[in-house]
Image (tube, rainbow, N blue to C red):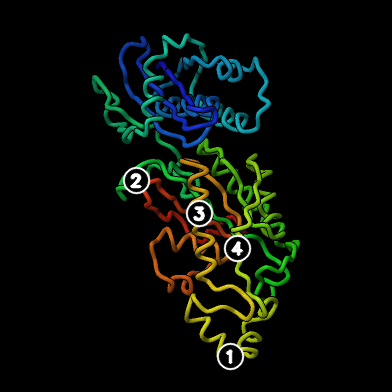
Amino acid sequence: MVVEADGGSRGNPGPAGYGAVVLDAGGTQVLAEVYDGLGTATNNVAEYRGLIAGLTAARELGATEVDARLDSKLVVEQMSGRWKIKNTALQELADTARDQAAGFDAVTFTWIPRADNARADALANRAMDGESSPALDPSAAAGPARKPATAPTETSEVAGPASAAAAWTGQVGTPVRMILLRHGQTALSIERRYSGHGDPELTEAGQVQAAAAARALATRLKKQGVVPAAVLSSPLRRARQTAAAVAEATGAELEVRDALIETDFGGWEGLTFREARERDPDLHGRWLGSADVEPPGGESFRAVGERVGAERRRIVDGFPGATVIVVSHVTPIKMLLREALGAGDEVLYRMHLDLACTSVADFYPDGGASVRLVNDTSYLD
């Protein structure tokens, strides 16, 4: 079969999308069309994603040999092994494309002029305009023509196509996917002590947890061909150490966001639950029952929710349609999940988040949201 693939970005980086067309061996009959938006990305990333989608669709249609045709000389030369790949993100995408190519008896990569790649280019532009193709129907492969289709991907609640969530929720547009990661273990967490603005480091076990989470996220994202736009971290050391492991594993830039800091527990900092209750029995009891009550000299959950909500809006505005990894603490992550669920304060007291756990929420440009995953620790021993 023949695969014509293309990708583009309006801004480079900017709103990006890819398109690919699968044709018969003669290059005349269209068997499948695949296209989707990528959020914010570069031209080269979009071009690689188009190639990956086209190869995936061809494989699902039963192709044994593929002639991949692109108007990107960079992708053609890099995939042919004649040019080195210096960019880490492109290297990961090239590896994914090679993994796809390995499933065929033979794959050739051919450069074609842009004018000869008009079909894939048009699909990429449709993707950048906010459209995406419906699901691929392998049963129609033997028919005389194909309906537009998307390339199937290995599903993952962490890194799966964000646009899939809109199929049944009715949301409009491509969401910002937030992968929410709690930091690893500290000395205070071992003893189950309140740990707010205090700044303990990760223990040795916490560093192991952070590394395991980083590897798992990098692997899942790579399988999906997703390049995270950024790793956003609380300013506290336990979060920054965890975030640094994730940034190194994924190749994404680490950015500290002060609003992602944990609750200020004030006079209860470093105390156990029992110690805080014995010190301030009446206040502690009221605090457990109301998000508006502050610890002595500390911060109420209502105040935390307001600053985290404002930060959520900044992230959505700053990374339209992208995937970002947010490394923070129990309360800020709960606030983001509560907002995505549209739930009341009560959920804050009923949700459990383990150390180094991953949760995922999509936030749509129309104001909607969808929670995809909560408290995943499957990658920890």
Give the residue type that dot 4 points to: His
Give the residue type that dot 3 points to: Arg
Looking at the picture, how far across and down is residue 303, in whole percent? 53, 68
| Mark drawn on residue 340 | none
Instruction: Name, please, the residue furthest toward the left.
Output: 144
Do the residues bearing badges 1 and 2 touch, measured as CB atoms within 8 Å?
no
Q: Give the spatial CA distance, label 3 vs label 4.
A: 15 Å
Query: Which sits earlier in the primary sequence, circle 2 or circle 3?
Result: 2
Query: Which sits earlier in the primary sequence, circle 3 or circle 4?
Result: 3
Q: Quadrant of the C terminus?
A: bottom right
Q: Secondary structure at mark 2?
A: helix
> How dense is the environment of label 3, judged by Cα within 10 Å: few (below 14), some, or many (20 and up)?
some
Query: Which sits earlier in the primary sequence, circle 1 or circle 2?
Result: 2
The residue where tag 4 is placed is 329
Q: Give the spatial CA distance, label 2 vs label 3.
A: 20 Å
| Mark drawn on residue 166 | 2
Taking the image as shown, residue 119 lies to the left or right of residue 93, namely left
Q: Give the spatial CA distance, label 4 vs label 2.
A: 28 Å
The residue where tag 1 is placed is 281
The residue where tag 3 is placed is 312
Looking at the picture, how far across and down is residue 253, in whole percent? 65, 42
Q: Give the spatial CA distance, label 4 vs label 1.
A: 25 Å
Establish if 211 lies above or below 79: below
Q: Secondary structure at mark 1?
A: helix
Give the residue type that dot 2 points to: Ala
Do the residues bearing badges 4 and 1 touch, measured as CB atoms within 8 Å?
no
At 53% from the left and 60% from the top, the residue drawn is 308
